[in-house]
Image: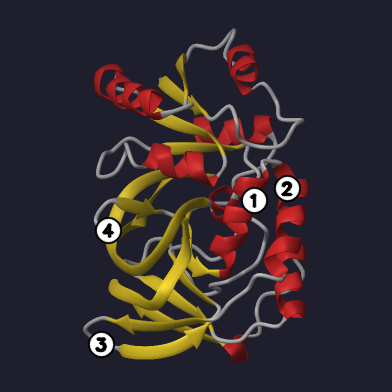
Amino acid sequence: MRLLFVINPVSGGKKKADHATLIRNFFNERAETIEICILDGPASEQELKKTIQYWHPDRVVAVGGDGTVKAVASHLLHTQIPMGIIPAGSANGMAAELSIPTEFEKAMVVVLEGKVQVIDVIRINQQEICIHLGDLGLNALLVKNFEQRGIRGKLGYALSSIKTLWQKQSLQVQIRNAEVHLSRVAFMIVLANARRYGTGVNINPDGNLSDGLFEVVIIRRLSLWELFKMIRRFKPFDPKKTEVIQADQVTIMTRRKAHFQVDGEYLGKTSSVKAEIMAKALHVLVPA
């Protein structure tokens, strides 16, 4: 079996492991053939694309957090090549969603012996993909503050959350597709392919990665205490203060430009987001 490992060297906190060495040592006396690609910029993205095309790996493994998983997934859409995940980021929401263990050795068992699950992907504005969760508003602001602070890991999230607590602003939004046309005031609009954030917050309890639909979760009201619960992994949002719409495509427009993030990557401010489902677009490895 030919295995391509894609490592993001900046994922995780200061105490992150040397995954390249761990991987080489793991396969030192095994029969599989391995290749390692370091994902550290646009040039390496092109190198990854070429490696997949010419090396024809049997499995491609993302070693990092949700951003790394998204980057690898973008090269595997509509192929039969399954993607494995070794969780190594500050937030590993997609790995948690797929029940992939955080321990290296156990995650490697899933890479080698796991079963294949075919999942949906959300296409956003014709150029981005979302395999986990994207959102406008509050959490996107938290992601921005986290990236600007430059401190990785849980400490970085904790410090960034303090700043975010005092910056929250409501959004005036319109949400449209063939079935609905809504106007709402909300703190946060979530495009949810999955169920929960990497922090453990269950934002979309009824989500299903393989049902050909995604959910638009509207957080209409939010107190400082509820935001604290979100960040500290206590309880999900109060369902009485949320609204959920199932869709296979939707357009979201905001009166003022709002912070926007996809799979843990801050994409700046926008006033318009168009999302549509790509059903059964990605093969992933999950525990057998």
Q: CA distance from mark 2 to mark 1?
A: 6 Å
Q: Under tag 3, what secondary structure?
A: loop
Give the residue at mark 2.
156
Query: Quick one: quadrant of the N terminus?
Result: top left
Query: Which residue lies at the image location 27% right of the left edge and 58% below the top edge?
Result: 278
Residue on which the image places disc 1: 146
Q: Please, what secondary structure does the residue beneath circle 2 have?
A: helix
Q: Are marks 2 and 1 in contact (CB under 8 Å)?
A: yes
Q: Is residue 150 left or right of residue 31?
A: right
What's the distance in space between the residues labelled 3 and 4, CA to CA?
19 Å
**Dot 1 alpha-carbon crowd within 10 angstroms: few under 14, some 14 to 19, many 20 or more:** many
For marks 3 and 1 on the same chain, the one whose residue lies earlier in the sequence: 1
Dot placed on the residue nearer the N-terminal end, 3 or 2: 2
Q: Which residue is mark 4?
A: 278
Query: Of 261 and 247, which appears nearest the observer?
Result: 261
Q: Which residue is mark 3?
A: 179
Front residue (pair 263, 173): 173
Residue 202 lies in quadrant: bottom right
Near mark 3 (Cα within 10 A), the count class, few <14, some 14-19 or many ≥20, is few
Picture coordinates of residue 259, whole percent (x, y): 49, 64
Q: How far is disc 3 from disc 2 in space, using C-alphas?
A: 41 Å
- Residue at left 27%, top 51%? 127
